[in-house]
């Protein structure tokens, strides 16, 4: 009987270890997913900033061309 009890204890310890590993993997995956979202958000912000910057440049060029046209027509 003592051997069976010892085996039962060892099996329970092993199951507890497996549960801890599963929890750790899930927590790690959640952290990775959160970091992936953060990176994607920063990339989107960078793209938007670049697009806004490009739009600002385009507006300046159009304004300069308009000013040139207005200056040439007077």
Image (tube, rainbow, N blue to C red):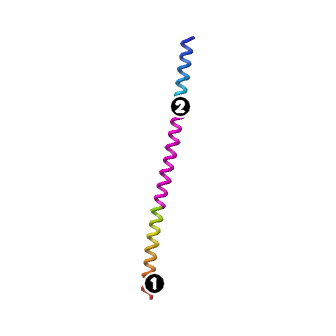
> Is 1 above or below relative to 48?
above
Could you tell me if the residues under marks 1 and 2 are in contact, i.e. CB atoms within 8 Å? no
Residue corresponding to mark 2: 20
Give above or below for 54 relative to 31: below
Please rate how many residues cluster around mark 2, counting C-alpha atoms within 10 Å: few if below 14, some from 14 to 19, many from 20: few
- Tell me the SS state at disc 2: helix
Indicate the secondary structure of the residue bearing disc 1. helix
- Quadrant of the drawing holding the N terminus: top right
On screen, 57 above or below 74?
Answer: above
Residue 29 among those drawn in magenta = yes
Where is residue 6 shown, x and y percent of the image?
A: 54, 16
Label count reads 2
Q: Quadrant of the C terminus?
A: bottom left
C-alpha span from label 1 to label 2: 74 Å
15 with respect to 66 (left or right):
right
Residue at position x 47%, y 51% from top? 39
| Label 1 Cα crowd, 10 Å radius (few <14 / some 14-19 / many 20+) | few
Q: Residue at x 44, y 82 (%)?
A: 69
Q: Tell me which secondary structure the magenta stretch mostly adopts.
A: helix
- Residue at image x 46%, y 69%? 56
Measured as percent of width and height from the top left, residue 27 is found at 53, 38
The residue most toward the bottom is 74
Coordinates of residue 24 in the picture (x, y in percent): 51, 35
Q: Residue 64, located in which quarter of the rendered image?
A: bottom left
Image position, residue 37 (x, y; %): 51, 49
**Mark 1 sits on what residue?**
70
Q: Earlier in the sequence, mark 1 or mark 2?
A: 2
- Residue 27 — which label? none
Does the magenta portion include 12?
no
Q: What residue span does the magenta drawing correspond to?
A: 19-48
């Amino acid at each position: 009987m003592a051997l069976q009890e010892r085996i039962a204890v060892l099996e329970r310890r092993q199951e507890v270890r497996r549960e801890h590993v599963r929890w750790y993997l899930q927590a790690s995956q959640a952290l990775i997913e959160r970091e992936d979202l953060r990176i994607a958000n920063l990339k989107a912000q960078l793209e938007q900033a670049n697009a806004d910057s490009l739009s600002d440049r385009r507006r300046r060029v159009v304004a300069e061309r308009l000013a040139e046209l207005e200056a040439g027509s007077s």
